[in-house]
Image: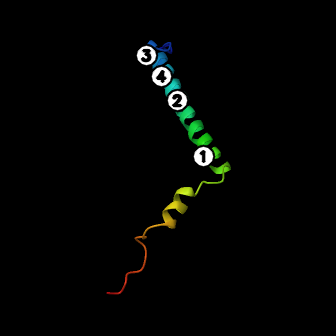
Amino acid sequence: MAIAPEHELHKRRFGRNVGVGLLLVAFIVIVFGMTVVKVTNGNFNAAIQSGMQGGSDAREAPDGN
């Protein structure tokens, strides 16, 4: 029995897979780019520092009452 030629369904599925793959790569590039920009600005821990500057912290030791 001879090998059957590629079915039309497989061609469409391959095209869809390529599209999803390109979207995934684009998403990864965007996230990586945003990370690089955030780190090169030097304020990548600004959210942590702003949380530690004011207000009480839940991790503080209890009063002992």
Q: For the residues labelled 2 and 1, say whether their Cβ atoms are less than 8 Å apart.
A: no
Pointer 2 or 4: first along the chain: 4
The residue that disc 2 covers is 23
Q: Give the distance between the C-alpha atoms of the residues marked 1 and 3, in whole angstroms.
A: 39 Å
Which circle, 1 or 3, is nearer the viewer? Answer: 1
Q: Residue at x 66, y 49 (%)?
A: 41
Mark number, residue 16: 4
Instruction: Relative to 43, say whether 16 is above or below.
Output: above
Instruction: Relative to 26, say whether 42 is above or below.
Output: below
Q: For the residues labelled 1 and 4, say whether their Cβ atoms are less than 8 Å apart.
A: no
Pointer 1 or 3: first along the chain: 3
Label 1 crowd (10 A; few <14 / some 14-19 / many >=20)? few
Q: Give the distance between the C-alpha atoms of the residues marked 1 and 4, in whole angstroms.
A: 29 Å
Task: Give the quarter of the image for residue 55.
Answer: bottom left
Residue 39: x %, y % from top left: 64, 50
Label 4 crowd (10 A; few <14 / some 14-19 / many >=20)? few
Which circle, 2 or 1, is nearer the viewer? Answer: 1
Q: Residue at x 38, y 81 (%)?
A: 62
- The amino acid marked with disc number 1 is Thr
The residue that disc 1 covers is 35
The residue that disc 3 covers is 9
Pointer 2 or 1: first along the chain: 2
